[in-house]
Image (cartoon, rainbow, N blue to C red):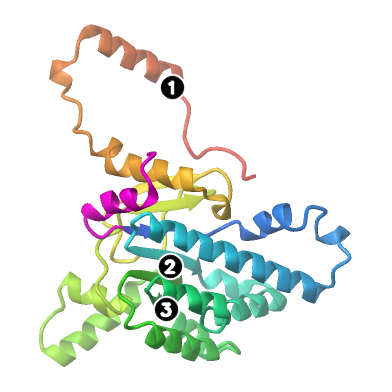
């Protein structure tokens, strides 16, 4: 875990293209704690000032996180953004979210990052259906423009998930269209390409925060991905933390299953002691912080 970044990236890359799913959640809590210590109700800033400060801080943080993954050898990053529940939020929140999304293709620091790191950007999910009849339909053109602008980048891939909560109907529609066009039923690879815009191999790692749930990775979640959940909000992810996750993924979880027929009595006793000590305890039970 103490390898220089370049050497660690080579180790990670040697295992094949790694696909990581990393929804960045808890940004408002992170911002209020780290960039507005007195809290919104005690600040003398205007609402517009707070919005500008929030967007700037979160955008820089997001770029730093993307850079962290890519510099450590991650080929493809899927980052679910939001689902249909966002449409039930207040108008002010929707306006802020839409403006923030539009900046992915207009803010110079995003564009510079995509160019410097050779990041090909795509969007997945049912955002066309959900946004088409809303005041935010223009976002679709912005997403398409950013996809086209970065289409020739070939070092890393970054997929933003929007309304990717349930792909059932979309996959059915894509299958019908594929059959009409080609006269045959699509295989899984073809469906993945249709859904994501290009082929994405099965997810290797999911890093969540808060409740134990893995989500918004249709067709690439096959039950083989390693799941990790941070205690602090996603923006707090550190380099050491990512290194520990990668070490666990590459080595700790690759150890062969125990051959119980070869275990000694004292080993069975240790196992019994551990299970009895933790009997009745359940991971995932508790209040949200």
Dividing the picture into quadrants, the one containing residue 17 is bottom left
Give residue 285's position: percent from left, percent from top.
53, 38
- Magenta region: which residues? 1-18
Location of the N terminus (image quadrant):
top left
Location of the C terminus (image quadrant):
top right
Q: Closer to us: mark 3 or mark 1?
A: 3
Dividing the picture into quadrants, the one containing residue 155 is bottom left
Gap between marks 3 and 1, in whole Å?
43 Å
Residue 74 in view here: yes
Which comes before the other along the chain, label 3 or label 1? 3
Front-most of 190 and 113? 113
Gap between marks 2 and 1, in whole Å?
34 Å
Residue 4 shown in magenta: yes
Q: Which residue occupies 58% across, 38% down?
A: 286
Left or right: 141 as drawn, with respect to 261: right
Give residue 61's position: percent from left, percent from top.
58, 62
Q: Which residue occupies 27% across, 77% down?
A: 198
- In the rendered image, which residue does mark 2 sit on? 165
Q: Which mark is residue 279?
A: 1
Left or right: 42 as drawn, with respect to 21: right
The crowd level at tag 2 (other Cα within 10 Å; few <14, some 14-19, many 20+) is some
- In the rendered image, which residue does mark 3 sit on? 126
Which comes before the other along the chain, label 2 or label 1? 2
Above-or-below relation of 51 to 135: above
């Amino acid at each position: 875990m103490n390898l220089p970044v370049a050497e660690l990236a080579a180790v990670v890359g040697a295992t094949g293209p790694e696909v990581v799913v990393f929804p960045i959640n808890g940004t408002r809590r992170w911002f209020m704690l780290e960039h507005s210590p007195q809290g919104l109700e005690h600040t003398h800033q205007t609402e517009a000032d707070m919005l500008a400060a929030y967007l700037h801080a979160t955008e820089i943080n997001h770029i730093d996180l993307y850079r962290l993954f890519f510099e450590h050898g991650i080929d493809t990053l899927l980052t679910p953004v939001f689902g249909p529940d966002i449409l039930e939020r207040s108008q002010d929140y929707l306006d802020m979210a839409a403006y923030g999304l539009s900046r992915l293709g207009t803010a110079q620091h995003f564009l510079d990052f995509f160019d410097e790191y050779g990041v090909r950007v795509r969007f997945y999910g049912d955002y066309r259906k959900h946004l088409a009849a809303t005041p935010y339909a223009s976002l679709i053109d912005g997403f398409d423009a950013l996809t086209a602008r970065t289409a020739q980048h070939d070092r890393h891939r970054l997929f933003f998930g929007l309304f990717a909560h349930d792909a059932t109907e979309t996959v059915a529609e894509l299958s019908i269209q594929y059959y009409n066009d080609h006269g045959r039923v699509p295989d899984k690879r073809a469906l993945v390409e249709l859904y994501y815009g290009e082929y994405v191999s099965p997810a290797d790692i999911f890093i969540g925060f808060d409740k134990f749930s893995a989500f918004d990775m249709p067709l690439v979640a096959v039950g083989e991905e390693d799941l990790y959940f941070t205690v602090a909000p996603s923006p707090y992810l550190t380099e050491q933390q990512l290194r520990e996750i990668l070490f666990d993924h590459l080595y700790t979880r690759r150890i062969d299953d125990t051959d119980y027929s070869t275990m000694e009595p004292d080993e069975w006793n240790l196992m019994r002691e551990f299970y009895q000590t933790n009997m009745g305890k359940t991971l995932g039970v508790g209040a949200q912080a």
